[in-house]
Image (tube, rainbow, N blue to C red):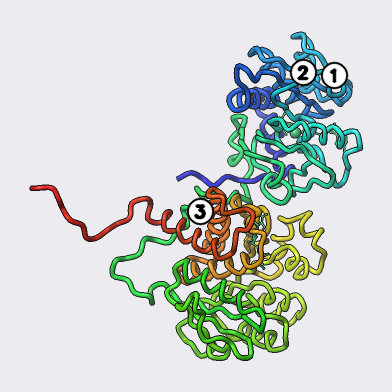
Amino acid sequence: MNNPIPLYSTADIREIEQLAVARPNPPNLMEKAGLAAAHITKDKLLSDDKNKILVLAGPGNNGGDAFVTARYLRTWGFQVTTIFTGEPSKLSHDAKQALQNWLSMGGELYHDIPSSGSWHVIIDGLFGIGLNPAKSPLDENYQLLIEAVNNMNLPVLALDIPSGLNADNGTAPSTAIKATITATFIGLKPGLVTHDGCEYAGEIILCDLDLDAISMKSPQSWLMDETLIKTLLPAPRPANSHKGAFGSVGIIGGASGMIGAALLAGSGALKLGAGRVYLGLLANQPSTVDPAQPELMLRPVDELFELDHLTCLVVGPGLGKEISACLCLEKILQTSSLPLVLDADALNLIAHHSELASVLRTRHAPSLLTPHAAEAARLLGTDIATVQNHRMKAAEDLARNFNCSVVLKGAGSICAFPNGHCYLNASGNPGLSSAGTGDVLSGMTGALLAQGLTSENALLLAVYLHGAAADALLETLAGPIGMTASEIIDSARHLLNQWVYGHHARFRYSHAHSIY
Ligand SMILES: NC(=O)C1=CN([C@@H]2O[C@H](COP(=O)(O)OP(=O)(O)OC[C@H]3O[C@@H](n4cnc5c(N)ncnc54)[C@H](OP(=O)(O)O)[C@@H]3O)[C@@H](O)[C@H]2O)[C@@H](O)CC1
Ligand SMILES: Nc1ncnc2c1ncn2[C@@H]1O[C@H](COP(=O)(O)OP(=O)(O)O)[C@@H](O)[C@H]1O
Ligand SMILES: [K+]
């Protein structure tokens, strides 16, 4: 089995680099980075009739990588124009050498994009992990340069990270290079796969520069990709099964005017394989059946508390913040020993009532929180911008503060666990930005818990599958515009069956036509 792909912070990468250069016969990492980037550019972006390249080299080592890339591409016969925005005297030893090598082979240097040139591909080596755009904002000249590059609408290969993006948290406060491909060095950075990184990074190719990063720095965070997720799937169902084997999900929510949220969570749970799904509705005169999904068992909320065969509870979709909702949540937190998925208004109530938060912290059964950024901000007593600018920290703080498994939702969702481990989701797209998709995620998570997955695995699989379901819809053009939460459910069911059973449906009865 392939190991999960680790994520490393800027500090981690610098530590790994220090360990590598302290070895006897240290590798020339800049040379390796430039060579790897030149190969990717040649193989993926250039061809015989697309052979003109504009290389942007910035003031630090990212610029050094750019000079090496430029040198290889020129050696291989491509036409390379190089812009340098730094000062030679301030370059590091390696970057100075890379610049010198470029000049020695007859390479020219410009300080701005020449007005008369035309190119097929751009290499972005302005800034890498050394830029913290929130602390040290890009000046207007850099912003204009980046905008000019983006407006050229050419394929761009970013070296290490698109310039303007923060490698640790994925923020791009002013602007950033919009890359077609990011060739990232040594290790994958969280900023490439969450928040604005999802906009700017394009296809990400990890170039390890022949370093075994994991043996040098033990990771705490990983990418959630299909390889990892496929190790978490439920087992194929035994032929002689019955509904009791697949658990019973109780969904609590659906106050007046918000019953749809509970119904969506219910359908999500049902179609992801829960044996039975009950809805405990808070509305005064709740419906008793959903004609569109009659398999769901709709009850007044109090009746749900009398069921003794539930496997887990999903609390929050359409719950509201009335006193009845608050009392209901308090009762669940105080008395239920079931795994809980807490979403939407359940999270808002916990944020507003510290006594609910205290009970949550001391629960022994697993609790899973599924906040979006605004709910996370309320739970942490901060604002949305602070959460979004430090998404990993926010997710980790929530997991630790509440002793819960957490998914901080949004582009590049982050799953965090009380043991400090973190997973960043690689699936999903803006088609998911519509009302009800979060309700579906909570129901899907409940279904996987009910089928016996651990709380960690249920959360990881549900989050990845939810995004992958949206990605599959994108391929058939059922989105991103107008993609609906209900469609996510059917797409997720299809994918899960495909993953668990492969492409070969197993029919028990068939007619043998051959003659023996
Ligand atoms: N680590 C490794 O093992 C390897 C690293 N490698 C490569 O090195 C990259 C990291 O290089 P790096 O540390 O030199 O930083 P980098 O991203 O070039 O930017 C810093 C420069 O920008 C400047 N600057 C900052 N903010 C600014 C602003 N707002 N406006 C204007 N200027 C600003 C800053 O100036 P200073 O603040 O120092 O005055 C400094 O000059 C890494 O991403 C990878 O590509 C590879 O060679 C392989 C091995
Ligand atoms: N741009 C996006 N890229 C990836 N996933 C997204 C994006 N926008 C929304 N999502 C996902 O859609 C879901 C929205 O949940 P939420 O905001 O709670 O919706 P609701 O409350 O309307 O059900 C989350 O799982 C979130 O991660
Ligand atoms: K860059």
Q: Quadrant of residue 350?
A: bottom right
| Residue type (three-letter) at the residue carrying disc 3 | Ile
Quadrant hosting residue 305 = bottom right
Query: Residue 374: x and y, percent?
Result: 76, 66
Q: Residues within 10 Å of mark 3 (few under 14, many from 20)?
A: some
295 on left or right of 375: left
N-terminal-most mark, 1 or 3? 1
Q: Residues within 10 Å of mark 1 (few under 14, many from 20)?
A: few
Q: Residue at x 63, y 75 (%)?
A: 317
> In 3D space, how far apart are the residues under numbered discs 1 and 3 (Cα atoms)?
47 Å
Kindly check if marks 1 and 2 are in contact, taking CB atoms under 8 A apart as contact.
yes
Q: Amino acid at mark 1?
A: Tyr
Q: Earlier in the sequence, mark 1 or mark 2?
A: 2
In the displayed structure, would residue 230 be above or below residue 2? Answer: below
- Measure the alpha-carbon separation of dots 3 and 2: 43 Å
For the question of whether residue 34 can be seen, the reply is: yes
Q: Which residue in the structure is indicated by mark 2?
A: 81
Give the quadrant of the N terminus: top left
In the foreground, 477 or 238: 477
What whole-number distance in Å separates the C-alpha atoms at marks 1 and 2? 8 Å
Front: mark 3 or 2? 2
Q: Which residue is mark 3?
A: 229
Q: Any mark on residue 430, and which?
A: none
The residue that disc 1 covers is 110
Q: Under 8 Å from ligand 3: the CB of mark 2?
A: no
Q: Position of residue 379 (x, y in %)?
A: 75, 70
